[in-house]
Image (cartoon, helix red, strand yellow):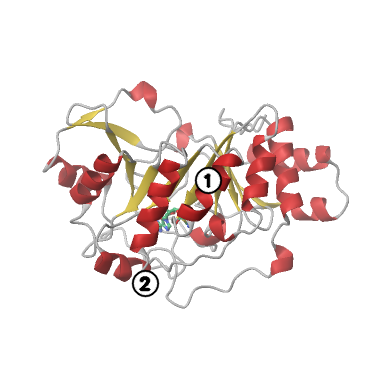
Amino acid sequence: MLADSYGRVATDLRVSLTDRCNLRCTYCMPPEGLEWLPKDEVLTDDEVNRLIRVGVTMLGIEEIRFTGGEPLLRRGLTGIVAAATALRPRPQTALTTNGIGLARTAPALAEAGLDRVNVSLDTVRPDVFEKLARRRRLPDVLEGMAGAAAAGLTPVKVNAVLMRGVNDDEAPDLLAYCLDHGYQLRFIEQMPLDAQHGWRRDTMVTADEILDRLSAAYHLEPADDHTRGSAPAELFYVDGGPATVGVIGSVTRPFCGACDRVRLTAEGQVRNCLFAREESDLRPLLRGGGSDEDIAARWRAAVATKLPGHGINDPSFLQPSRPMSAIGG
Ligand code: SAM
């Protein structure tokens, strides 16, 4: 088991497959992109598969989320998914993606055993999309979501970040779009994880504001708390249900006490939290002849040191040096 000293057990593994991305969302990356990891520092497909196998068969990982950067840019993605879903006990698998290229790859991902996708969609207006993501790719994203649904990668969950003065008026429109298409929408509060360090507490759009804006157009009712468990999203029935909308209040409504997540970066670092300032490097063991037991032992030791909370609201909070795209969101 991957247990920490506060009684939490990590069973949900977020695996970053690349730090590269084909969008430049303003809350994540600067327009020019970032200095990408050199190719030889990124784990190979075999190395990723081995870490996932150790996690599932020796450490109690039950759920795997592939992310990045943009995981659809990883050539070996389908093979990595197939290797994960061939493990026993079989983990649940999901992919967090910006949706570009998903229409084409969804059938192969479903064939490889992928269970579902989370697609990031912050706006349904092409001009706003271009402003936020600095690319004209909204039609590709919408096609990707439809392709995922058609391939059975359901429920399609949609992640949206609202930015003040850009798309903060769009919460009801996004919900209408998702309800019409049968997608499950969740709003994520903007977090201090952008490479440019532009996040500001006084301008971020809070969970309370998101709920107020939605409530102007829809009747929201909290869904039974028992359904939340360790899930980060607080769920609300929309107009009596059964459709729901979620709000992930990472900053103003932290849920660290129920966190069951652990992360692997694309170059093999274990991270206990998006906001962790420490990492534990598994790559020297992978490349230096370490045994599976050696890897499991280092991984266990890393999780044992997990802090009780992310600390964003502490006066001494310091933003981690890695941006979201290099951690794996
Ligand atoms: N490229 C994929 C995607 O777009 O979903 C996966 C990686 S992306 C880093 C994962 C999620 O993190 C996306 O939903 C994105 O909107 C979100 N994200 C990125 N930077 C963020 C920030 N500063 N605050 C909140 N969410 C952020």
Quadrant location of ligand 1? bottom left
**Measured Cα–Cα span from mark 2 to mark 1:** 28 Å
Quarter in which the N terminus is drawn: top right
Residue receiving disc 2: 134
**Percent coordinates x, y for residue 115 in the rendering:** 52, 36
**Percent coordinates x, y for residue 319 in the rendering:** 47, 60
**Percent coordinates x, y for residue 125 in the rendering:** 24, 62
Q: Mark 1 belongs to which amino acid?
A: Pro
**Farthest residue in the bottom direction?**
32
270 or 98, which lies in front? 98
Which numbered marker is on residue 107? 1
**In the rendered structure, which disc, 2 or 1, sits on the residue that comes first in sequence?**
1
- Secondary structure at badge 1 equals helix
Q: Residues within 10 Å of mark 1 (few under 14, many from 20)?
A: some
**Percent coordinates x, y for residue 271 in the rendering:** 60, 49
Q: Is residue 48 left or right of residue 262?
A: right
Q: Nearer the viewer, mark 2 or mark 1?
A: 1
Residue 313 in view here: no
Which numbered marker is on residue 7? none
Residues tagged 2 and 1 counted as in contact (Cβ below 8 A): no
157 or 15, which lies in front? 157
Task: From this view, report whether residue 121 is shown above or below residue 235.
Answer: below
195 or 308, which lies in front? 195
- Secondary structure at badge 2 equals loop
Name which residue lies at 39% across and 60% down: 140
281 or 123, which lies in front? 123
Q: Is residue 317 left or right of residue 123?
A: right
Name which residue lies at 33% across and 35% down: 234
Q: Residues within 10 Å of mark 2 (few under 14, many from 20)?
A: some
Q: Is residue 261 left or right of residue 295?
A: left
Q: Mark 2 belongs to which amino acid?
A: Arg
